[in-house]
């Protein structure tokens, strides 16, 4: 979402212009996320790094 060390809802909301933690939490929890697409994107970025070690 934005750069920062902690990736929980509260710190992310604090880094956003409106800082609405409840709205951000509802967005994350109620959005129709395709977990397979997200996992694929993570794998594309991490497999090359893990394979090179």
Image (cartoon, rainbow, N blue to C red):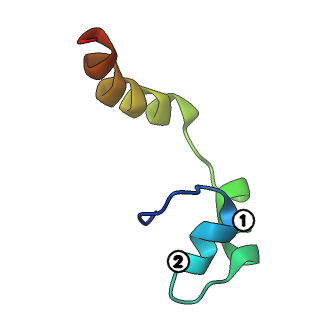
> For the image shown, how many numbered marks are present on the structure?
2
Residue 48 in picture, x, y percent from top left: 25, 18
Q: Is residue 3 left or right of residue 26?
A: left
Residue at image point 72% right, 57% down = 30
The reply to whether dot 2 and dot 1 touch (C-beta < 8 Å) is: no
Q: Which residue is mark 2?
A: 15
- Circle 2 — which element? helix
Q: Nearer the viewer, residue 39 or 33?
A: 39
Q: Is residue 45 left or right of residue 2?
A: left
Residue 5 in picture, x, y percent from top left: 51, 57
Q: Quadrant of residue 8?
A: bottom right
Residue at image point 62% right, 74% down = 13
Q: From the image, which quarter does the C terminus lie in? A: top left
- Circle 1 — which element? helix
Q: Which residue is mark 1?
A: 25
Residue 13: mark: none
Mark 2 or mark 1, earlier in chain = 2
Q: Residues within 10 Å of mark 1 (few under 14, many from 20)?
A: some
Q: Nearer the viewer, residue 18 or 3?
A: 3
């Amino acid at each position: 979402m934005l750069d920062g060390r902690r990736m929980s809802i509260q710190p992310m909301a604090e880094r956003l212009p409106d800082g609405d933690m409840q709205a951000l939490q509802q967005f994350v929890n109620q959005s129709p996320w395709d977990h397979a697409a997200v996992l694929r994107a993570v794998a594309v970025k991490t497999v090359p790094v893990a394979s090179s070690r």
